[in-house]
Image: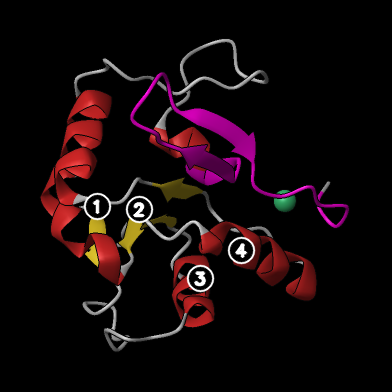
Amino acid sequence: MRPTFILDNNVKHLKTLLPRGQAKTTVECGLRPEADDIAVIGLAYERKAILVTSDVGIVKKSKRFQSQRSVCLFGLLILPDGLEQQLRLLNDIRSRRKVFRHQQFERTVTWNNIREENLFVNARMAGQPGLQDLCDCDWED
Ligand SMILES: [Zn+2]
């Protein structure tokens, strides 16, 4: 089965907090632990998976990856630093204390929406997660 989430090495311990059986770490997918960001982004693209990371620098690199190759990724979830904060956030998302909203959606945004519409989720501790489009593509219909 194809995973829905790829966990960057810095958040690999969060696997069990994502929907069961749908998350894989970069290392489980064959990358080295110290693989560079472009390899990690490329893996998420190949697997059509939401990339989960605590590395904010990935946002800019993901946008560059898309424009250089004229492709769209499959969503990005940025978590804050710190295991305790990450656990709390994912629990809040699971229990729907934190929900995903985006102006283009009438209803609450789902993980599938994030993947299919290539949304970028900035999950911060204070307030609700911020959702934006990850691509501003002119190669897509
Ligand atoms: Zn796009």
Residue contact at pointers 4 and 3, CB within 8 angstroms: yes
Residue 108, percent across and down?
Answer: 46, 16
Of the residues under marks 1 and 2, which one precedes in the sequence?
Answer: 2
Badge number at residue 4: 2
Residue contact at pointers 1 and 2, CB within 8 angstroms: yes
Label 1 sits on a secondary structure element that is loop
| Identity of the residue drawn at 34% across and 55% down | 5
Mark 2, Cα crowd under 10 Å, few <14 / some 14-19 / many 20+, is many
Q: CA distance from mark 1 to mark 3?
A: 17 Å
Q: CA distance from mark 1 to mark 4?
A: 22 Å
Label 3 sits on a secondary structure element that is helix
Of the residues under marks 1 and 4, which one precedes in the sequence?
Answer: 1
Q: How is the image coloured?
A: secondary structure
Q: With respect to residue 29, does 121 lie above or below?
A: above
Badge number at residue 22: 1
Read off the residue under disc 3: 41
| Identity of the residue drawn at 33% across and 30% down | 125
Q: Amino acid at mark 2?
A: Thr
Q: Which portion, as a residue range, is magenta? A: 115-140
Question: In the rendered view, does 68 fall on the left or right side of 46?
Answer: right
Mark 1 or mark 3, whichever is nearer to me: 3
Read off the residue under disc 4: 62
Mark 3, Cα crowd under 10 Å, few <14 / some 14-19 / many 20+, is many
